[in-house]
Amino acid sequence: MILEVAILNIKKGFSEEFELNFNKAKRIISSMDGYISHELKKCIEQDDKYILLVNWETLEDHEIGFRKSPQYQQWKALLHQFYEPFPTVEHYK
């Protein structure tokens, strides 16, 4: 199992809209092959900051199966406009 970790810094004042869009986007990611589970947590100390944890069966399920899929374009359209700066994504085993 691979854990994807992303720190998401959201543009100031857009957290509520981000959360609404994430509720739509989570249906996309959870339908992907190799997806196991995810958690989105809001930071207590800093407004507009979240951590996204996604468990995948393999690194390829995330990097190839998800990121190179047509569904990723839907994910991107829903969420990417909220990030500032764009998040760094790391993987752990």
Image: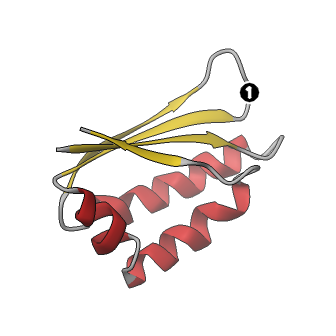
Residue 4: % across, % down: 37, 45
Above-or-below relation of 89 to 81:
above
**Left or right side of 70 for 84:** right
| Location of the N terminus (image quadrant) | top left
Q: Looking at the image, how many numbered discs can be counted on the residues? A: 1
Residue 59: % across, % down: 26, 57
- Where disc 1 sits, the SS reads loop
| Residue found at the far right of this picture | 12
The residue nearer to you, when weighing 86 against 29, is 86
Residue sitting at x 61%, y 42%: 8
Asked if residue 31 can be seen in this view, the reply is: no
| Residue found at the far top of this picture | 45
Q: How is the image coloured?
A: secondary structure
Above-or-below relation of 67 to 42:
below
Residue sitting at x 59%, y 67%: 78
Q: Residues within 10 Å of mark 1 (few under 14, many from 20)?
A: some
Asked if residue 76 can be seen in this view, the reply is: yes
Which amino acid does the dot numbered 1 rest on? Asp
Residue at which label 1 appears: 47
**Left or right side of 42 for 64:** left
| Location of the C terminus (image quadrant) | top left
Residue 45: % across, % down: 69, 15
Q: Quadrant of residue 62?
A: bottom left
Residue 31: % across, % down: 25, 65
**Left or right side of 90 for 93:** left
Residue sitting at x 32%, y 73%: 64
Residue sitting at x 60%, y 61%: 79
The residue nearer to you, when weighing 84 against 23, is 84
**Left or right side of 10 for 7:** left
